[in-house]
Image (cartoon, grey):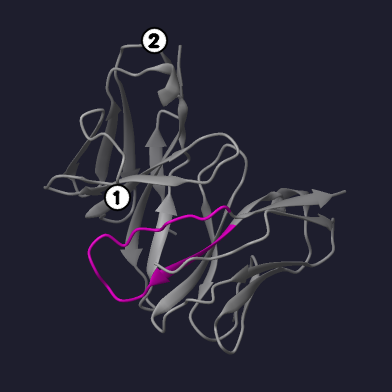
Amino acid sequence: GAVVSQHPSRVICKSGTSVKIECRSLDFQATTMFWYRQFPKQSLMLMATSNEGSKATYEQGVEKDKFLINHASLTLSTLTVTSAHPEDSSFYICSATRQGARGNTEAFFGQGTRLTVV
Amino acid sequence: DAKTTQPNSMESNEEEPVHLPCNHSTISGTDYIHWYRQLPSQGPEYVIHGLTSNVNNRMASLAIAEDRKSSTLILHRATLRDAAVYYCILRDGVVKAGNQFYFGTGTSLTVIP
């Protein structure tokens, strides 16, 4: 089946620095990828939709200048958390979708990136 | 996308069947019912999906009510590795830009040895 790979799986950074997280679709082309954030004991919250070759679409309340998204190719999207602060510590998950044979949309998720800002 | 309602948590004994319910009374005619599960510290993984008919795969079965306002994910023999949060998600099958999946609170399944 399709695989979406995220890197790194875990990162610790100092407050004020920036961190880049990569999301790759390994065996299919994804014109659209999605970034989620998940705090402990909570559900996944969609942050933004990453569109290949164009600007990302951000959900309400998500700061686009803080969470920079780049989708330069059909298999790679990156999320950069700029000037990270401890409140940005979270589990970040990417996803890519494709149309299935039965007419539905299939979503594939990365393994997640645990970001800790100290 | 239409909203789903699931119990916050459920328990099951190992090797017994588990029935995880999901209510989606505002489902539209083109909404597919998707189930994903999330093991601790991992991204969600696909379990099963359906539109109107019941579905079976190697992981689980999906029973869809005749009026489609509810569905039940069935794990035939729970194992300790099935302990996870199970999400029931509706997604419009009409192709359109975005294709986002919005997650609800899900059901946290505990499997008791």
In x, y percent, where is residue A108? 42, 54
Q: Residue at x 54, y 77 (%)?
A: B25
Q: Residue at x 27, y 22 (%)?
A: A82
Q: Is residue A36 above or below residue A114?
A: below
Give the structural element (helix, strand or loop) at label 2: loop
Name the dominant secondary structure of the magenta segment.
Answer: loop
Q: Is residue A41 above or below residue A98?
A: above
Which quarter of the figure has residue A87? top left
The answer to whether residue A83 is left or right of residue B15 is left
Which image quarter is the N terminus of chain B in?
A: bottom left
The answer to whether residue A86 is left or right of residue B62 is left
State yes or no: residue B30 in magenta. Answer: no
Q: Is residue B1 above or below residue B93?
A: above
Give the structural element (helix, strand or loop) at label 1: strand
In x, y percent, where is residue A67? 27, 31
Q: Chain of mark 2?
A: A
- Mark 1: which amino acid? Met
**Residue at the disc numbered 2:** A14
- Mark 2: which amino acid? Lys
Upstream in sequence: badge 2 or badge 1 = 2
Q: Is residue A76 above or below residue B7?
A: above
Q: Residue at x 48, y 46 (%)?
A: A44
Q: CA distance from mark 2 to mark 1?
A: 28 Å
The magenta stretch spans which residues?
Answer: B87-105
Which quarter of the figure has residue B47? bottom right
**Residue at the disc numbered 1:** A33
Q: Chain of mark 1?
A: A
In x, y percent, where is residue A109? 43, 49
In x, y percent, where is residue B89? 49, 64
State yes or no: residue B97 in magenta. Answer: yes
Q: Nearer the viewer, residue A107 or A56?
A: A56
